[in-house]
Image (tube, rainbow, N blue to C red):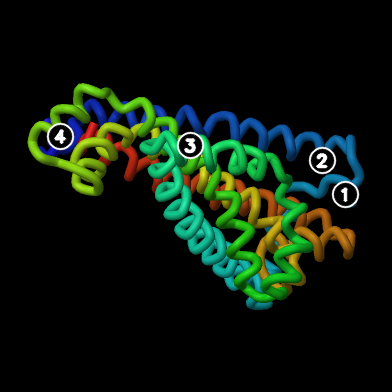
Amino acid sequence: MPGTIPPPPSEGARRRGARRAALGAVLPLLLLLAWELVTRAGVFSPVQLPGPAAVVRAGVDLVTRGLLLPYVGISVQRVLVGFAVGAALGLAVGALVGLSRPADVLLGPTIGGVRAVPSLAWVPLLILWQGIGEDSKTTLIAIGAFFPVYTTAASALRHVDRQLVEAGRAFGLRGLRLLGAVQLPAAVPGVLAGLRLALAQGWLFLVAAELIASSMGLGFLLQDSQNNGRTDRILLAIILLAVLGKLSDAVIGLFERWALRRWA
């Protein structure tokens, strides 16, 4: 029942989780092995595709020079702040559109059109409006995070079981009380799916955001490495973006499982 404390996972569930994690590591390990074999066979030149050891050396070099950890830190900060702002706005506007027919008619078509604008198209405007500081970068990431949460929240709230809503009204719930007690809990699975998509979108928009006259971050590392022909650093930045994206998604996944046990 909603509101009860879920029991701790059983030994069997922990074993299944460990087995799933082990199976999930098989493909990355195979790709790593194939990468090493291809580079040793000379299929590509070291400039085109440096080996895994060269990428590790590039990472160690950046760490010893005191650059890699600040780059990772500022990128994570930008994504988290932009995600928080975009997700909050997406949930608020999605709730309005999902619960109000006039708001849906008034706002839905315009938001749907704006959603189709590519991320890089926002860069010139954000530079003009907000300059080249952190605000423009955070805003671009927030734009990317807004639309998945808005779309899933509006759809989930629009399709909440009418009987649940009527039951809540029968108990005297109206407005925000009805939304918090009945409608949002019923829409939890859809909203959580939107949050996961929004966080992934935030990482996608990060690279575009760090093209805005940035001097730090993984997006800057990608651009700077391309300009200097450092393929090893390009691969390092790509791998770090993949790892950070997966780790952040795993955190949202843990919250999702807890929230589904709590409210679903």
Give the amino acid type for the residue marked by disc 4 in the picture: Arg
Hey, what amino acid is under mark 3?
A: Asp
Q: Please give left or right for residue 65 compared with residue 2 in the image.
A: right
- Image height check: is 126 above or below 264? below
For disc 2, the marked residue is 39
Q: Find numbered disc 3 in the image and state the secondary structure of the residue it sits on.
A: helix
| Label located before the other in sequence (2 or 3) | 2
**What residue sits right under mark 1 in the picture?**
46
Contact between marks 2 and 1 (CB within 8 A): the answer is: yes
Q: Which residue is mark 3?
A: 104
Label 2 – label 3 distance at C-alpha? 54 Å
Q: Earlier in the sequence, mark 1 or mark 4?
A: 1
Q: Nearer the viewer, mark 2 or mark 3?
A: 3
Q: Which numbered disc, 2 or 4, marks the residue that appears first in the sequence?
A: 2
Task: Quarter of the image for the N terminus: give it.
Answer: top left
SS at circle 1: loop
Q: Which residue is mark 4?
A: 169
- Contact between marks 4 and 3 (CB within 8 A): the answer is no
For the residues labelled 4 and 3, the Cα–Cα distance comes to 22 Å
Q: Amino acid at mark 2?
A: Thr
> Depth-wise, is mark 1 or mark 4 nearer the camera?
4
- Give me the residue at 34% from left, 31% from top: 17
